[in-house]
Image (cartoon, rainbow, N blue to C red):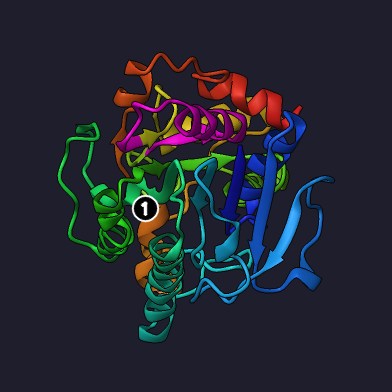
Amino acid sequence: MRVIITGGTGLIGQALAESLVRDGHETIILSRSPEKASNLPMGAQLVEWDARTPTGWGNLIDDDSAIVNLAGANLAGEGFFPERWTAGRKQLIIDSRLNAAKAVFDAIEAASAKPAVVIQASAVGYYGPRGSEEISEEDEPGEDFAAQVCVAWENSLADLEDLGVRYTIIRTGLVLSKQGGVLSRLTLPFRYFAGGPLGSGRQWMSWIHLADEVWAIRLLLKNRSASGVFNLTAPQPVTNAEFSRALGRVMGRPSLLPVPAFIFRQVFGEVSTIVLDGQRVLPKRLLDLGFTFLFPGLEPALRELLG
């Protein structure tokens, strides 16, 4: 199978591409700046695109191809610390997703042979802050900015079904990886013996090991009955306080110094909702497909990642 990955230079995209190449699949990564791309798996093809149109890559689509659309600006920004959600930043977050999705839709609409499947990225932020309520794919969206972004992102390619294309949405939780991302931010204070819960610590964290994220996507690529929404989270979500205690045990550090919520809100503004609010999301439909998690529990996942 030929798999075209937009946003393929990011954390999930690179890991997915490496897995696909290893198993002999033709893997094409679309990038706005190929000259800056690094650490890509040997054997993957890098193709330039403008993230707005099918120019230069639309001809790669055929009936034995799949598209995994991961393109979109990071909600928390590209730096180590979160970027405030200014009006301009919010517009960038939305535009980066909708422009890329439009390019994907236009490419498929113009193609004489349609791809077998399109997998569209989304996030558990779709559900908004929900306290301790257990959430499945059937639950309604929230009303905050992150939820609005996810709703628009998912709807941007919904018309693909009218073109006869299988359309699958992945609502991903916090991806834990050795290669950076959220885990590098969470471990830093623990390295200096200053770790502890964030805010109340009662907010739920729906997480997933990067290896399980990749294998779940690959299952959805292969399984022809897999359409609609799938939560990509481990089956054992934890509260932030539980996460902090597990991280402290694995790193051999105390978890005693909570960071008051008002500090986060004062310094980072609205974007602080990413760490101070949460959702208790369960991967019901993924489990119904028979998916077996390599890392269903947090502490074994952390031990594998942190060694």
Magenta-drawn stretch contains 42: no
| Secondary structure beneath label 1 | helix
The residue that appears at 32% across and 58% down in the rendered structure is 157
Count of labels in the image = 1
Q: Can residue 23 be seen at all in this image of the molecule?
A: yes
Rendering coords of residue 307 (x, y %): 76, 27
Residue 273 position by quadrant: bottom left
Rendering coords of residue 125 (x, y %): 33, 51
Kindly identify the amino acid type of the residue bearing the numbered disc 1. Answer: Leu
- Which residue is more in the foreground, 195 or 108? 108
The residue that appears at 57% across and 75% down in the rendered structure is 55
Query: Looking at the image, is 31 positioned above or below residue 53?
Result: above
Horizontal placement of 11 versus 241: left or right? right
The magenta-colored residue range is 205-230
Magenta-drawn stretch contains 224: yes
Residue 302 position by quadrant: top right
**Residue highlighted by disc 1:** 276
Horizontal placement of 13 versus 159: left or right? right
The residue that appears at 44% across and 48% down in the rendered structure is 198
Rendering coords of residue 6 (x, y %): 56, 58
